[in-house]
Amino acid sequence: MKPTQAYRPENLHYLKMLARQYPTVQAASTEIINLQAILNLPKGTEHFISDVHGEYEAFLHIVNSASGVVREKLDLLFGASVPRAELDQLATLIYYPEEKLEEIVQNTSDMREWYRITFHRLIEVCRLVSSKYTRSKVRKAMPAEYAYIIDELIHTHYEDSDKRDYYENIISTIIDIDRAPNFLVQLCWLIKRLDVDHLHLVGDIFDRGPGADIIMDCLMGYHSVDIQWGNHDILWMGAASGSRTLVATVLANSLRYNNLEVIETGYGISLRPLAVFASEVYQNCDVSRFEVKLTNEDAAHYTDKDKLLAARMHKAITMILFKLEGRKIQRNPCFGMDDRLLLDKIDYENKSITIHGTAYPMEDVDFPTVNRDDPYALTPEEEELIHQMTRSFRHSEKLQRHVRFLYSKGGLYKVYNGNLLFHGCIPMAEDGSLLKFSIGCDGLSGKAFLDYADLTARRAYYSRPGSEERQFGMDFLWFLWAGRNSPIFGRERMTTFERRFIEDESVWTEAKNPYYQYYQDPAVCDRLLREFGLEGPHCHIVNGHIPVKSKKGESPVKGGGKLLVIDGGFCKAYQKTTGIAGYTLIYNSNCFRLVSHEPFAGRANAIRENQDIASTSVVFERLESRMKIAGTDVGRQIQEQIDDLMALLWAYNNGEIVEDHRS
């Protein structure tokens, strides 16, 4: 670096601050050597998951197994020497150490010998998965209480006769003092920690399945993660922010799919006010169009009375939702969604509604709370109910903690190691150009609009309560959820109203944004990547949101390999359509690998039978040479640190800064 570049006054001031951390030539030199060594290590493994939709058992299994990476390591080490049944048991032990160990203890006569053999195998796995990291990073990842012991075992060569007794003595002592169960659990945890360096969750944690809160707890404890907000995540973020419309949407969706456990048990939000209101106001109403979707297992536990109450609650909150949505559209003409104002288009006498110039018969016009002269006005009772429910969402400590995490670790998109990650789409016009939006902004498109949308979404939660910024932010979150061509909704319209009241399915159509046709073109994908500053042979778009219909032959690989769709159907409700239970993506230092998963038989069955998720792994792109940390985003940051330290060395050697040997 030239002195004129390094030693402008402001740069010298920075270097003096850096000198406080590295006060001598030796200190700066040592750090340069350490950082340069890190750059030459292999890139860590990245794991991409999308659209888990509350299916926490399948999600946790995919995370525990790292989409087959754990089993791959076991096969590499022991495939030729350990029977398949023992490998299956070892894999399950790593995934679920506490539960599997409990079963093994009950069925094993000589636990001492079992522990000895298992510890040897687990240490071998630890040694392999830690090989691509610095010893310092591995030590920091270790459980504090066993860090010294594990470090010794990993770096002791058993083949060395002088060390063999030392190694065996450590293991024997752990067993003798009854620390074997705890030590085993910690070893399994460390293996999973080191197998994957970073996790990407490409949207839609919430809705449909029963355990979104459990998934969020897992993500909050994960060592390195980012999240791209999906439309269902935005929905819950808006409800937590205090949007009455999105609170009503969460409740309507949860009732529709009988997914109330996450609301009541997960987040401690009582539905009693809604049940009381629905029982009183909708007692004599037709609710046949609002029957709740029940699985065969759930239906066996629901009486006719339970089903009727659920349908009444569903209709009650849905009518409140339609009113609130209408008022939001009226309040925000910039959304351009006046055609979605439907309550005022109902012809009650003829039981019909006119949509886009066509009259359709309505199956239900029994709306006791709708004022025909002012259809979007809430009744006093509805006002009180939605106020109570919104306050419950705002005061749920666990929900607020989870939503703050979504804001801190999430965003509408992520550029990471040459890949562009987002949940829905980059909105495009019919002619293939980037669609421009003027929603509180002046004709923004592409990256500029997503940056604006990301900031506006944050204002919904962090701006001062009652401020215009917060109110518009909450309205904007609803636009992201259901607005025309929203980047995370990606459709022309959301036809919830039509699906509830009109039998003619032709009016249910939710036309996709043109993006979903254009993304088949490699040139379009390259253009979108350049929009976000990416260019090169190994740059990709990683997408979720639209399930891949594998059983119809659809491929998750689009745009000549430039775009990957990894929503294959975690949600059980989608699996009849997709034919599988999800795609995940692994990107390690050698290749990109797509993994397709069959439906998960459940945690209990996996532990009892040592059954993994049946998966098919396909390497679809191999790197010309092994990717090192130097070629990653972290590597570029490290190189900047090295450049700064080299400048500091120059300053020391030329007397611009004086060494401080007192430290």
Image (cartoon, helix red, strand yellow):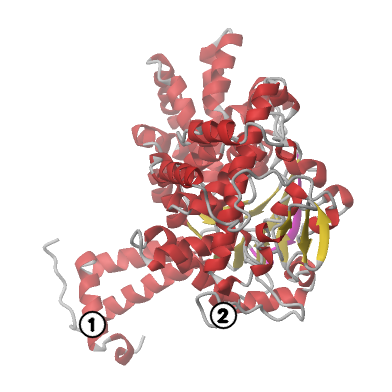
Check disc 1 and give the amino acid type.
Leu
From what the image shows, is residue 579 above or below residue 172?
Answer: below
> Mark 2 and mark 1: span between their CA atoms?
40 Å
Q: Is residue 362 above or below residue 458?
A: above
View extreme (bottom): residue: 4
Residue 561 placement (x, y as % from top left):
76, 66
Query: Number of labelled discs?
Result: 2
Numbered mark located on residue 12 in the image:
1
Do the numbered discs 2 and 1 sit on residues whose CB atoms are within 8 Å?
no
Mark 2 — residue?
A: 444
Identify the magenta region. Answer: 615-625
Extreme residue toward the right, this view: 552
Looking at the image, the residue that sits furthest to the top is 109
Q: Is residue 640 left or right of residue 122?
A: left
Measuring 18% from the left and 83% from the top, which residue is drawn there? 655
Name the amino acid type tagged 2.
Leu
Foreground of the two, 496 or 414: 496
Residue name at image x 78 percent, y 68 percent: 356
What's the residue at 41%, 25% (across, down)?
170
For the stretch drawn in magenta, what is the main secondary structure? Answer: strand
Q: Quadrant of the C terminus?
A: bottom left
Residue sitting at 70 percent across and 29 percent down?
81
The foreground one among 96 and 556 is: 556
